[in-house]
Image (cartoon, rainbow, N blue to C red):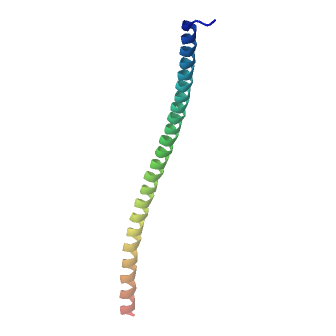
Amino acid sequence: MITQHEKRQRQFDKLADEWQRKMNDLQTELDNSQKESRAHAADAYKLKAQLDENREVIDALRRENKNLSGQSADDFVNVIIIINIV
């Protein structure tokens, strides 16, 4: 016959096992979340680097466009002067 104490001990062991499984599941979930977070942080870093690079390219293109626009205006004025001379 199982004594009352042995019964309680089994119930306690079952409960402890259940909580151990829950803790293991939560630890696995935490590990996966941290891994995913690190991956997202790496992606964000790469995207920021690409954004910075693209901004530099845009600035360079704007400067070049401005220079070319100034040259075009000068060329247009020169053509007008040549037409008036001829």
State the image coordinates of residue 78 (x, y, percent, origin top left): 37, 83
Task: Specify the farthest residue to the right.
Answer: 1
Q: In this view, does 2 lie above or below 82?
A: above
Quarter that holds the C terminus: bottom left
Q: Is residue 78 above or below residue 84?
A: above
State the image coordinates of residue 73 (x, y, percent, origin top left): 37, 78
Of residues 73 and 16, the one drawn nearer to the viewer in this rendering: 16
Q: Is residue 53 above or below residue 5?
A: below
Q: In this view, does 26 lie above or below 74?
A: above
Q: Is residue 69 left or right of residue 28?
A: left
Quarter that holds the N terminus: top right
Q: Residue at x 58, y 13 (%)?
A: 10
Q: Quadrant of residue 13?
A: top right
Of residues 32 and 4, the one drawn nearer to the viewer in this rendering: 4
Of residues 30 and 83, the one drawn nearer to the viewer in this rendering: 30
Q: In which quarter of the image is residue 22?
A: top right
State the image coordinates of residue 11 (x, y, percent, origin top left): 55, 16
Q: Which residue is drawn at 53% across and 32% down?
A: 29
Task: Specify the farthest residue to the bottom.
Answer: 86
Q: In which quarter of the image is residue 3?
A: top right
Q: Which residue is drawn at 49% across and 38% down?
A: 37
Of residues 47 and 22, the one drawn nearer to the viewer in this rendering: 22
Q: Which residue is drawn at 42% across and 56% down?
A: 55
Q: How many marks?
A: 0
